[in-house]
Image: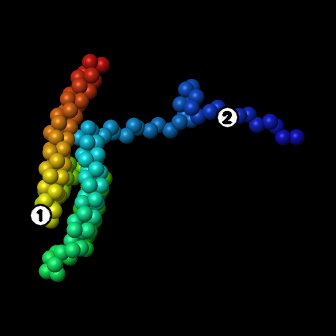
Amino acid sequence: MAEPVQPEPAPDTPGDASAQPSRAAPPARSLRQSLAAVILACEALIVFLAALVIWGLAQGEPAGALPSWVALAAGGIIIVALIATIGLLRHSWAYVLGWVLQVLILASGFLNPAMFVVGVIFGGMWWYAMVVGARIDRKHAADAAAGKEQQ
């Protein structure tokens, strides 16, 4: 006859430290990085809608004007760049890429003047996120360093 099997303790029991693998907590995202990601994601949606508007307006243009597919292609390239930049924000050079994208979006105002307004609004939000986010991150780092010194 087989012996009854003893149940193993649940892996979340506090007394059994060997049951849970030791994992370091992932580093917390900085506020600057979080704000930049939100701004770029919102901007990707707005660029998508703006590309559709510019494409629609270009349908009635005379034959010598910019082809209507250029608006969709350029908008698609900028959207892909915005989304890729979100993933690259862990690198410091990605913030420079974000500034370049802000300038490109502002320059798209030459295709549709309303994009000047969009470019100024998102450019201002990007600037605010870079300046204030970095300032708050420095304060948090100083507070964390002070807390470690007191221990």
Q: Secondary structure at mark 1?
A: helix
Q: Position of residue 52 (x, y in %)?
A: 27, 64
Q: Quadrant of the C terminus?
A: top left
Q: Residues within 10 Å of mark 2 (few under 14, many from 20)?
A: few
Residue wearing tag 2: 8
The tag on residue 133 is none
Q: What's the colour scheme?
A: rainbow
Q: Residues within 10 Å of mark 1 (few under 14, many from 20)?
A: few
Q: Is residue 71 above or below residue 49?
A: below
Residue 149 vs residue 115: left or right?
Answer: right
Q: What SS does tag 2 mark?
A: loop
Residue type at mark 2 is Glu
Where residue 18 appears, x then y in whole percent? Answer: 55, 34
Q: How many marks?
A: 2
Q: Please tell me whether residue 29 is drawn above or below residue 49 in the rendered image.
A: above
3D distance between C-alphas at marks 1 and 2: 69 Å
Instruction: Identify the amino acid type marked 1.
Output: Phe
Q: Residue at x 55, y 26 (%)?
A: 14
